[in-house]
Amino acid sequence: MSDYQRQANQLITSLDLSLPPVAVAFCDVVPNNVPDFDGLAPAGCTFWQEAATRTFATSARDHALCSVGIHTHNLSEAPASQQDELQATLQAMVGLDYLREEEVAAIPVLQREAKHALYGPLAEFPIDPDVVLLFTHARQGLILSEVAARVDRGIPPAMGRPACAVVPQVLNHGHAAMSLGCCGARAYLDVLSDNVALWALPGSKLAQYCEQIEVFARANKTLTVFHEQRRKDAELGKRPTVRESLQRLS
């Protein structure tokens, strides 16, 4: 079993994920045996959902309907119309006061340009991932926030529009981040339902996250039983000490 297969299994088992971890990597040369994306994507974020079941390579032309995604991912060889499309998109957002001129520069953009973005299940990814994506609900996100605070030694950001900006945010800074998505991503992705958020982990620290996710998942399970018992006791008018409650766990 490869390291990535083992780490994918760790993440799925510890967090009880309903969708496998998705890996993302940027490169100038596509690895052998990795097919190009075959289809028409309305937005770059749709590749995340597709990548839960298969590995494929994309270039700027595959992101052509998503000028914001081409911008945040700094993809080279973009269509000539990309800048016009991007400006039209930004102007529409500014017109709605959804975005302001001074906020545009704050949108994270990948620091290095790349020809291709690769997507696929972490368990079978052919190269080292730059970012690993997890679709989670609040309980799973709780564990990830606790892990990120320990591994990254800081509080992870909770990001909004655009959802694709979480990828350059994590890759540029090397720290985990959560994205609540954006109205576009939530329109395009079936998996991004109202009770689901997206977490992104830097591939360079994936082993550390996986190790601590196991620790915190186990601790959360034990402490949940502890607190549930304390609640029942209080509802029955009992006043157990912490030591008494802990003894009941063993």
Image (tube, rainbow, N blue to C red):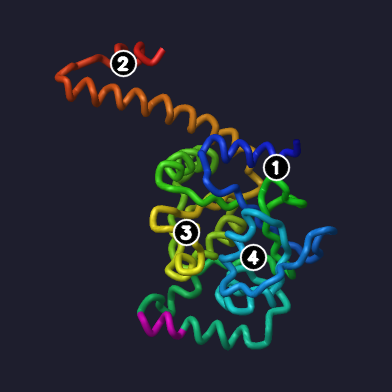
Against 169, residue 85 (above or below) is below
Are discs 1 and 4 less than 8 Å apart at CB?
no
Q: From which residue to which does the magenta span run?
A: 91-96
Was residue 56 drawn as part of the magenta stretch in this picture?
no
- Mark 1 or mark 4, which is nearer to you? 1
User: Could you say which disc has been placed on residue 245 in the image?
Assistant: 2
Helix, strand or loop at disc 1?
helix
Q: Badge 2: how crowded within 10 Å, few (<14), some, or many (20+)? A: some
Whether 43 is drawn above or below 123: the answer is: below
Count the marks.
Answer: 4
Q: Quadrant of the C terminus?
A: top left
Q: Tell me the element at label 2.
A: helix
Q: Secondary structure at mark 4?
A: loop
Which residue is the site of mark 3? Answer: 192
- Amino acid type at mark 2: Ser
Label 2 with label 3: CB-CB less than 8 Å: no
Residue 94 shown in magenta = yes
Q: Are marks 4 and 3 in contact (CB under 8 Å)?
A: no
- Give the CA distance from mark 2 to mark 3: 39 Å
Give the amino acid at mark 1. Tyr
Comparing marks 4 and 3, which lies closer to the viewer? 3
Name the residue: 61% across, 56% down: 171
10 Å neighbourhood of mark 3: few (<14), some, or many (≥20)?
A: many
Residue tagged by mark 4?
111
- Quick one: label 2 or label 3, which is nearer the N terminus? 3
Q: Earlier in the sequence, mark 1 or mark 2?
A: 1
Residue at x-position 44% and y-position 46%: 155
- The residue shown at (43%, 48%) is 137
* Residue 4: assigned label: 1
Proximity of marks 3 and 1: CB atoms separated by less than 8 Å: no
